[in-house]
Image: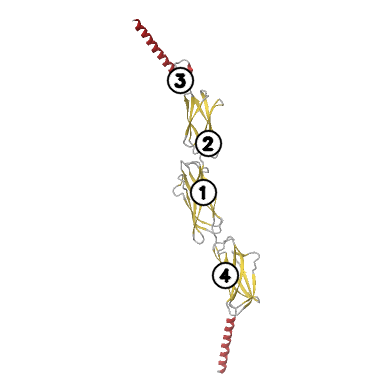
Amino acid sequence: MKKISFMFVTILGLVLLMQTAYAAAPSLNVVLSSQNPYPVEPGGIVTVEIELQNTGYSEATDIVLKIEPEDPFTLVLGETETKTFTKISASDSIKSTYKLHVSESAVSNDYDLHFRYYKGTDPDITVEKSVSVRVQGSPKLILSSINTDPEDVEPGDTVRFEVDIKNVGTGRVHYMEATFNSSSPYIVPVLAGGSYYMGELDPGSSEKALFDISIGNDAEYGTYPATLTLSYRDDTNTLQSTTFSVGVPIKGQPVIEVLSAKIDNSDFKVDIENIGTGNAKALKISLVQGGEVKDSAIANELKPTRHKTLRFKGFSYGEAAINITYLDESNNEFTREIPVSIKQSVYAEDQGQGGGVSPTITAILIVIVVLETFYVWRIRKRKK
């Protein structure tokens, strides 16, 4: 009985001794003290500060801490992978910093950064720990190109606008929708042609937005203001929007046509009209016969649907041509040559033939005959 009691006391003493020794042993843990910047963008450099804590009741000596980064992290060149700490007092801690490069292909997420530590004299017994590092991309949208079909936009056209949108940022775009608007009454989306759903857009990717736009018939040459608004959600599901100012260039093309050409008194009168869609500038209109310019006229400007009357002198009857040169708003030169026929009027024909009597001469002769008849009648009356 005494032997059993002695053994029990011995075992109990050993247990208490082991518990006391365990309680007095150091207890280490790895925690993230800080991350800068927070969050870090893909492709960036992040500095993490690690705190190695000793929560035990005795000091820890000769402790080796090793960082073991995995994708998307790599240790910046020159950084030390393994660090040794001579002593960490009980209930104390030490801090260590590391600079890491984040892969450009990383997507927004929380990534584990791995560590392991061990006693320098016993590297086979290690403890693995990890901390969480926040990586979050930020989208950035640009307009890389804008094309129209047709290429030259004129009044009255229905135009397909093709806008190439590129994400040059580091975060994804979600549920993106593009909206086209203009304050001009001449620029109007066709039906639902002012909105275009684009969906997802990864970093480095491009997507086209298509819009159908009607151009007013009365629109003049110029660039008309419009806006393109992109609404989307980022990786944190936050609603974002980006608005771009764009211009809609309307060129138009002037077309000068001869409406009529005829003799008017002693002039050859020509009426011209701009039947095109753009302004005509620096007009020069010449009357040409036999390869020779008989007369010319100049006009500064002729807008669409407007007409102008010109008068020429020095002409001859017969075939001729109206030569017209003018510029559009982009200073491109246009030339038109329109054949015309200069015909004599009835009065001119009567005078030129010699075989007939003109109305004027006939009237004069009638007056003379009347006067002479009256004169003869008076003489006869006096004789009676």
Q: Mark 4 or mark 2: which comes first in sequence?
A: 4
Q: Mark 2 or mark 1: which comes first in sequence?
A: 1
Image location of residue 257, percent across then percent down: 49, 33
Observer able to see residue 173: yes
Q: Amino acid at mark 1?
A: Val
* Separation (CA) of disc 4 from disc 2: 74 Å
| Residue 281, label in figure | 2
Tag 4–tag 2 contact (CB < 8 Å): no
Helix, strand, or loop for circle 2? strand
Q: Residue furthest top?
A: 383
- Residue that badge 1 annotates: 246
Q: Nearer the viewer, residue 188 or 3?
A: 188
Tag 2–tag 1 contact (CB < 8 Å): no
Q: Mark 3 or mark 1: which comes first in sequence?
A: 1
| Residue 93, label in figure | none
- Residue that badge 3 annotates: 347
- Residue that badge 4 annotates: 32
Q: Mark 3 or mark 2: which comes first in sequence?
A: 2
Q: Amino acid at mark 4?
A: Leu
